[in-house]
Image (cartoon, rainbow, N blue to C red):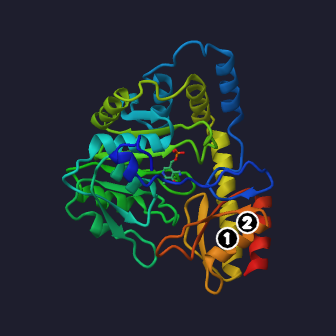
Amino acid sequence: MSKFWNKTTTSLEPYVPGEQPKDKKYIKLNTNENPYPPSPQALKAMQEAVNGDLRLYPDPTCSDLRETIAGYYGLTSDQVFVGNGSDEILALAFQGFFSPDKPIVFPDITYSFYPVYAKLYGLRYELVPLDDQFEVPIERLCQPNGGVILPNPNAPTAKYMPLGGIRAILERNTEHVVLIDEAYIDFGGETAAALINDYPNLLVVQTLSKSRSLAGLRVGMALGNRELIEGLDRVKNSFNSYPLDRVALAGAAAAIKDDSYFKETTQKVISTRDAVVLKLRKSGFHVAESKANFIFISHASKPAEEIFLALREKAILVRYFNKPRINNFLRVTIGTDAEMEEFVRAISEIV
Ligand code: PMP
């Protein structure tokens, strides 16, 4: 508490990101990063950008990157927005599309940034509880509301809703923005980007942090009809007219273009995940069905917090959430095969 803070700052309960230890001794399975490096093409493009003209401001419209992304998804560049990580795009969407008079609905349990933004921007929200299997009850998202936000796959449960479910939500929610946060879609899900031309209120938000191994670069994107993109542009330009720097613009475009590297590394993560899930289930763990680069696990006889602390002792970091309903679960990011072998060995010794 400080006398220099205003009322908003004083009342904030900011989001706490996962730990980034300086010590390299840990096997880091706690923040859903990709275990593989970014595309060599992306690294080369960034090196060239560093050696290029950093003296000059970047392109405020990010037009080359937007065109590259549009080409990738079969859209036009005015249906694409890019920002400094998808967190920034989510913040702009909260400011641009929702009003204080009607609540935004999102699942309870979900990405914990959503309630933080809602509070920051003075917006109401209503939580829709997941069922016993952590499935999102579609009906409840279709009650009168001022907008819908749904991560697909959901975080931290890793559960995926097939496009039929997304379509059902869109059919019944036509008056306000339906935002699908697809941070983890590339690990086995199908993007809703193909529905954009059918539903003018659909905004799909994605990131290069996970499937393209560029969490450190901070690049996210939103796909939607032009009015929504213009809305994001209006908020962004009132706030920071240069969302991405020259290095990020170059690296992100090259990463999107290097599709074979992207496919190879995401496929590797998927097959490692599926093998780990089988092993953990054999060892008595409950593992929620995952289409993400992480898994959500619990054990019938050993509390999650104890497992979390014991893994930490063994220099393995995973994520534990001390929250109702999920405080007996751990979220574990999928690492390399070698890291996951070490993880399975360590956790088997603990339970
Ligand atoms: N959405 C979800 C569901 C996430 O888990 C994350 C990562 N923590 C983000 C968005 C934000 O990702 P970034 O800002 O790195 O693009």
Describe residue 349's horizontal placement relative to residue 78 as left or right: right
Q: Residue at x 70, y 81 (%)?
A: 282
Q: Are marks 2 and 1 in contact (CB under 8 Å)?
A: yes
* Type of amino acid under label 1: Phe
* Type of amino acid under label 2: Arg
Q: Please rate how many residues cluster around mark 2, counting C-alpha atoms within 10 Å: few if below 14, some from 14 to 19, many from 20.
A: some
Residue 321, x across and y down, in percent: 55, 67
Q: Secondary structure at mark 1?
A: helix
Describe residue 315's horizontal placement relative to residue 181 as left or right: right
Q: Is residue 196 visible?
A: no
Q: Residue at x 66, y 63 (%)?
A: 318
Which residue is the site of mark 2? 312
Q: Which sits in the foreground, 188 or 139?
A: 139
Q: How many marks?
A: 2
Residue 43, x across and y down, in percent: 69, 31
Q: CA distance from mark 2 to mark 1?
A: 6 Å
Q: Secondary structure at mark 2?
A: helix
Q: Which sits in the foreground, 248 or 302?
A: 302
Q: Which sits in the foreground, 56 or 118?
A: 118
Image quadrant of residue 309? bottom right
Q: Residue at x 79, y 50 (%)?
A: 24
Q: Which sits in the foreground, 260 or 283?
A: 283
Q: Does the residue tagged 1 have its C-beta within 8 Å of any atom of ligand 1?
A: no
Q: Is residue 23 visible?
A: yes
Describe residue 226's horizontal placement relative to residue 299 as left or right: left
* Circle number at residue 308: 1
Which quadrant is the C terminus positioned in?
bottom right
Q: Is residue 264 above or below residue 248?
A: below
Residue 183, x across and y down, in percent: 50, 50
Residue 31, x across and y down, in percent: 61, 55
Residue furthest bottom as drawn: 301
Q: Please rate how many residues cluster around mark 1, counting C-alpha atoms within 10 Å: few if below 14, some from 14 to 19, many from 20.
A: many
